[in-house]
Amino acid sequence: MPEVLKAPLVVEFPFTRSLGPVQSAFLTGLREQVVLGVATTDGRTLVPPVEYDPVTAEELRDLVEVAPTGTVTTWAWNHEPRRGQPLATPFAWVLVRLDGADTALLHALDAPGPDAVRTGMRVRIRWAGERTGAITDIACFEPYDGEPVPPGDSDGTFEDQVAGIVAHARLDYTYSPGRAQSAYIAALSGRRTVGERCPSCRKVYVPPRGACPTCGVATAEQVEVGPAGTVTTFCIVNIKAKNLDIEVPYVYAHIALDGADLALHGRIGGIPYDQVRMGLRVEPVWTDGGRYPDHYRPTGEPDADYETYKELL
């Protein structure tokens, strides 16, 4: 039985956003160990606060302080915490309606086990030792059986208000290609590019997916394409990517390999970026030990006629 290919992949980016007056006051308040909600015109208090009433769409600006104690409205046990989650040991995700609020706040509850958690239990905020104006200033909730803590009277006015945040989004996953892509990858190891032909429309798709995206029927017939091809369209990259050792500006292009009916993408090298053009004939350049072409360079042939690749734009 052939080896099943798989690879760990990570999609990660920092998302920077500015804050309006409501969110700015809320996060600054957490830094000062104050939890703020926003009052609606019909008397509800929303925590976390929002800038517009989700029921009436009215703009909301009246901030009110709520208590650091509250009641669990629902929960789920997390047996295996992941990287970046609030606690390193198993914990419960809980929705907590803080005293004085009409909506619930999602956070972690530090509890010894699922038997120690229940809907309706009383909890309080455990503040982080170092606070910067982020939701993580609440380290977690913890069980609480004391007297209710009255809220303060903050109106959301603080010095050095938090004006923006950076949210780090990350997705870790394991990718395993199917039959068609495994064959494509295996061919690349031999410096060959292989696609699959649709038995209905007869188009050759590279990289293959195991089915025709136009007809929806399975594909199995392998067809070797290239190695040369034609630049159908391209862009000039002026922003240097993290962990990518390529000097900017450089060109990334869609390349229709000879014999293929779908353009794949690749970097263009061996030519000044401002001389790359549609119709340019290119060929792959491999590095020692490379699993795929490092880039494509001009072949020196005359440019392809537009009519030969216009359907692949």
Image (cartoon, grey):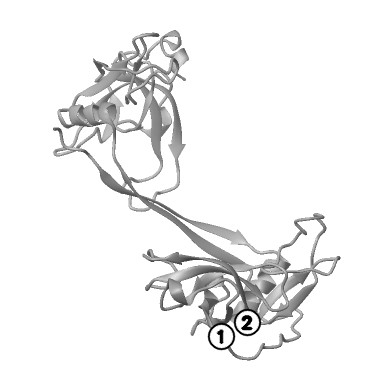
Residue type marked 1: Tyr
Neighbour class for label 1 at 10 Å: few (<14), some, many (≥20)?
A: some
Q: Secondary structure at mark 1?
A: loop
The reply to whether callout 2 and callout 1 are in contact (CB within 8 Å) is: yes
Cα gap from disc 2 to disc 1, whole angstroms: 8 Å
Query: Looking at the image, how many numbered discs can be counted on the residues?
Result: 2
Residue 305 position by quadrant: top left
Work out whether mark 2 precedes mark 1 in sequence or the reverse, and give the earlier one. 2
Q: Residue at x 35, y 13 (%)?
A: 198
> What is the x, y in percent for residue 298?
30, 24
* Residue type, mark 2 in image: Thr
Residue visible at 78% across and 55% down in the picture? 55
Q: Which mark is residue 144?
A: 1
- Residue ID for mark 2: 69
Q: Is residue 60 left or right of residue 287?
A: right
Pick the front one: 150 or 130: 150
Q: Residues within 10 Å of mark 2 (few under 14, many from 20)?
A: many
Label 2 element class: strand
What quarter of the picture does the N terminus occupy? top left
Rendered image: mark on residue 246: none
In the image shown, does 8 or 160 lie closer to the viewer?
Answer: 8
Task: Determine the image quadrant of residue 157.
Answer: bottom right
Relative height, residue 267 to residue 305 (above, below)? below
Residue sitting nearer the eye, 138 or 293: 138
Please say if 69 is above or below 248: below
Residue 169 seen from this side: yes
